[in-house]
Amino acid sequence: MADLYTQLMRMPVTSTVGKRIGLPQPVELDRGSSAVGGRVLLGGAGRLAEAAARVLAELRADSATALDDPVRELAARAGLDAAVFNPAAPADHRFKALVFDATGISTSAELVELQRFFHPTVGRLQRSGRVVVLGGERRALEGFTRSLGKELGPRGVTVNLVHVEEGAEERIGATLKFLLTPRSAYVSGQVIRVGTNKHKPVAGRTALVTGGSRGIGAAIADVLEREGAHVVRLDLADAELELDITTPDAPERLAERFADGLDILVHNAGVTKDRTLAKMPEDRWQSLMEVNLLAPERITEALVPVLRDEGRIVCVSSLSAIAGNAGQTNYATSKAGLLDLVTDIELDRGITINAVAPGFIETKMTAAMPVGVREVGRRLNSLRQGGLPVDVAETVAWLAGSGVDRNVVRVCGQSLLGA
């Protein structure tokens, strides 16, 4: 359900008035589908173009390339039957997504290829469209994609950059499918790194979701179940596994519960105890740390030995961990500590660890905010609206099924705050 402001801005009279005085005009984002939903234009001819064409063929996406683009031959070799795009075609020739392989750009002078591909095409993107740039480790591409995301965000378009290691060309499938479909509705302006770990679907795997009985945790559990996982929801009450994760014996009890093996561990349980630091006693600080950080650290240590090969760990952090937030020194510290866990923990056997960092998500907690603070939170991103719990859940499910490792992905509509 859209918030009241968004509902008003979608009504003809208020929308017209809003446009005239420069008010944000949030568009309805596509959600709830694993299909692209429109034509995809593929361009560029580096080391990833053929692999990207294979992914589009697997998606059965209606695809196109320019007639004189070298990628056309690569697409045909990959089994992708692509139409021909003519830049002089009428303006009603539209695209749902643009995919550009920038790995062929090896010098600064060649960055003009970005302008040559996107200049005649970004205006043809449909609302709630997708732009994905595939590249190596070039900071210039980060500046380009983040700026383009802010230009296109008001139309509901997301723009993301995927860095792909040498030798990982055939590992882009799960990530590209996620970024091209409505599952990534609230993920924009992100830099995602794909390595050589294998993609392993969540179907048939066993997952543990802490804090899984309500809010974002319940949405995560629901999406994992939709994808075919057997999910154990852990919470203090109303859950299949009722347990206080802060008790000294909690890690041991969980290790015993999953002695036969666990595939996916999602650290979602968390609390807020906001107060300025000058007014925060030690017990208030420490009780939050026990739930948000110390328990996940101890539980991870206990469960890694029972995680099966190619297991997945996903931590639910927060935009506050990246940008900070007044009155949340304890919360931001704990959620940033989860990012330390992602960076520092030593894992083997193909086990990966990643984190999501939600921004403003429509929950009971945000609904209780003062109206002014709530509206600023909703509009202070490129998409001009708040996200939904399902947006976080879809991102967690992608990380739990893909082979990407050590990524921190913000689910924030490209918030204007933070890095």
Image: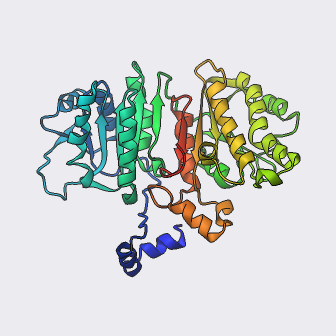
- Quadrant of res 207: top right
Looking at the image, residue 112 sits to the left or right of residue 346; the answer is left
Above or below, comparing residue 368 to residue 348 in the picture: below
Looking at the image, residue 225 sits to the left or right of residue 211; the answer is left
Q: How is the image coloured?
A: rainbow
- Quadrant of res 92: bottom left
Q: Position of residue 418 (x, y in %)?
A: 54, 46
Above or below, comparing residue 374 to residue 181 in the picture: below
Q: Position of residue 182 (x, y in %)?
A: 43, 50
Q: Nearer the viewer, residue 210 or 372?
A: 372
The residue located at (35%, 45%) in the rendering is 131
Above or below, comparing residue 256 to residue 321 in the picture: above
Q: Nearer the viewer, residue 67 or 154?
A: 154
**Visible residue check, residue 416:** yes
Q: List the single residue furthest toward the bottom.
A: 13
Q: How many marks?
A: 0
**Visible residue check, residue 180:** no
The residue located at (78%, 31%) in the rendering is 298
Q: Position of residue 267 (x, y in %)?
A: 69, 39
Q: Position of residue 56 (x, y in %)?
A: 32, 37
The residue located at (24%, 41%) in the rendering is 115
The residue located at (64%, 38%) in the rendering is 315
